[in-house]
Image: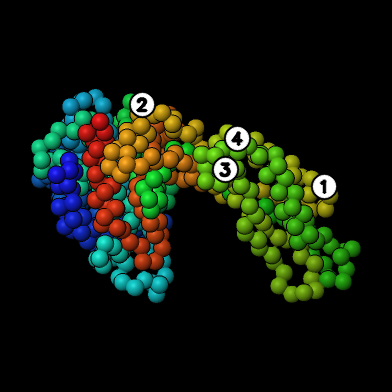
């Protein structure tokens, strides 16, 4: 009998947890929801008699939701090494169902079909949340003391920027230290073969190009904002040549600078447009400073202003400087690799992604964090689902890490 075979007997726990969690709509107020409080309460009650050594709650004030707080729950199981702590951090909030017509089942009623559990949130992030609980249940039922002190954290507000979740907690509560092992399983691939250790910086810039409207036959009387906008678009392509560093850790190994949104103001054929808006989505390798890229963007815009006589207003929609990547040899990365090897006999590769996970906030504080899970990436889509098999096999990897992955 294998060391972790017991975990395969916990299939009903997976289904029960998924059904209960999916039923409770934990949608952020920005998306028209009432937050995570009921999901937090459910978890608190559900876990109250499991035998944890400690349960803590963190409430971040938020007047927009009826409970007036955004809740985070932390459950602790003491390990052999009291001072070495392993955190598995998952989020309780979910995105809205989107267009309901595209769903084959009720998004907030988990439906089991063979290996799949359908419903909003079943994959993002309930699958890993459930895996972490299954791993702990295995330890508790078999009276196994983990190597590290375990902290499972069920955090609020991941989907809309973590301002009432991990970002707030890192800024206001002194509960993490640099020696902690931090796992935030919220990114993955179907093979369970990629450990995310790096993210690109995000910069979203909007340019409002102001020229002068005139009759279509009299360009001499106007300043054509559409022409200036097009030249701006082309000149911004220069960014690819200037910031051309490559890093093979990333799936796209270079920085990207893509014009996205274009809004014109003229709908008829015979008017020279006096105004146009252009959006630019930049995903920048962590070796570059956003400041530096932004200065270059401003000088490109200034050259278009000069050459075409337009005025360009620049505004920034999003700006998040990527922290330095997690060390390839960080203990949490090594442990994960070893556990994946032990359970699946696979060498997991280290990767970087386009940006914006909970781990980024840890890296900014100089705390090493890694992301890993086995998911089909149906998150945020209609008919989102979670695989029961992957939930259980990820639980085995988590359990192996909890035991030190020897
Ligand atoms: Zn997520």
Mark 4 in CB contact with mark 2 (< 8 angstroms): no
For the residue pair 307 and 337, the one nearer the viewer reads as 337
Q: Earlier in the sequence, mark 3 or mark 2?
A: 2
Q: Secondary structure at mark 4?
A: loop
Which residue was labeled with disc 1? 306
- Asked whether mark 2 lies closer than 8 Å to ligand 1, one says no
| Colour basis | rainbow
- Whole-Å distance between the Cαs marked 4 and 3? 14 Å
- Whole-Å distance between the Cαs marked 1 and 4? 28 Å
- Whole-Å distance between the Cαs marked 4 and 2? 25 Å
Residue count near mark 3 (Cα–Cα under 10 Å), binned few <14, some 14–19, many ≥20: some
Mark 3 in CB contact with mark 2 (< 8 angstroms): no
For the residue pair 314 and 1, the one nearer the viewer reads as 1
> Residue 236: percent from the left, percent from the top?
71, 48
Q: Secondary structure at mark 1?
A: helix
> Residue 329: percent from the left, percent from the top?
41, 28
Q: Nearer the viewer, mark 3 or mark 2?
A: 3
- The part of the image, by quadrant, that contains residue 334 is top left
Residue count near mark 1 (Cα–Cα under 10 Å), binned few <14, some 14–19, many ≥20: few
Which residue was labeled with disc 3? 253
Q: How many marks?
A: 4
- The part of the image, by quadrant, that contains residue 83 is top left
Mark 3 in CB contact with mark 1 (< 8 angstroms): no
Which residue was labeled with disc 4? 288
Q: Earlier in the sequence, mark 4 or mark 2?
A: 2
- Whole-Å distance between the Cαs marked 2 and 1? 50 Å
Q: Nearer the viewer, mark 4 or mark 3?
A: 3
Whether 278 is drawn above or below 134: the answer is below
Q: Secondary structure at mark 2?
A: loop
Which residue was labeled with disc 2? 178
Q: Residue at x 58, y 33 (%)?
A: 287
Q: Nearer the viewer, mark 1 or mark 4?
A: 4
């Amino acid at each position: 009998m294998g060391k972790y075979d017991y975990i395969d007997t916990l299939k009903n726990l997976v289904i029960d947890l998924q059904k209960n969690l999916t039923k409770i709509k934990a949608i952020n107020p920005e998306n028209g929801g009432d937050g995570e409080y009921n999901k937090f309460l459910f978890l608190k009650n559900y876990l109250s008699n499991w035998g944890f050594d400690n349960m803590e709650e963190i409430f971040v004030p938020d007047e927009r939701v009826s409970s007036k707080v955004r809740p985070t729950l932390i459950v602790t199981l003491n390990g052999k090494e009291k001072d070495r702590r392993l955190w598995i951090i998952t989020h309780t909030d979910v995105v809205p169902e989107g267009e309901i017509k595209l769903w084959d089942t009720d998004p907030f009623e988990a439906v089991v079909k063979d290996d799949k559990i359908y419903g909003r949130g079943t994959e993002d992030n309930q699958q890993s949340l459930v895996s972490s609980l299954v791993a702990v249940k295995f330890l508790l039922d078999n009276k196994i003391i983990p190597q590290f002190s375990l902290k499972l954290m069920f955090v609020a507000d991941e989907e809309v920027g973590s301002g009432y979740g991990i970002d707030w907690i890192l800024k206001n509560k002194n509960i993490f230290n640099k020696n902690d092992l931090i796992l935030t399983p919220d990114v993955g691939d179907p093979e369970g073969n990629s450990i995310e250790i790096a993210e690109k910086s995000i910069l979203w810039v909007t340019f409002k190009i102001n020229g002068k409207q005139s009759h279509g036959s009299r360009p001499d009387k106007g300043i054509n904002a559409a022409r200036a906008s097009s030249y701006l678009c082309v000149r911004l392509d220069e960014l690819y040549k200037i910031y051309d560093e490559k890093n093979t850790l990333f799936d796209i190994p270079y920085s990207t600078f893509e014009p996205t949104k274009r809004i014109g103001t003229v709908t008829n054929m015979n008017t020279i447009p006096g105004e146009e808006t252009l959006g630019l989505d930049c995903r920048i390798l962590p070796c570059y400073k956003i400041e530096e890229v932004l200065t270059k963007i401003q000088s490109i815009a200034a050259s278009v202003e000069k050459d075409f006589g337009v005025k360009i207003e620049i505004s920034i929609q999003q700006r998040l400087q990527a922290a330095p990547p997690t060390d390839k040899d960080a203990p949490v990365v090594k442990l994960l690799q070893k556990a994946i090897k032990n359970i699946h006999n696979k060498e997991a590769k280290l990767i970087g992604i386009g940006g914006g996970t909970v781990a980024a906030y840890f890296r900014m504080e100089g705390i090493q964090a890694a992301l890993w899970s086995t998911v089909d990436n149906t998150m945020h889509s209609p008919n989102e689902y979670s695989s029961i098999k992957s939930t259980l096999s990820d639980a085995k990897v988590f359990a192996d890490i909890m035991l030190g992955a020897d």
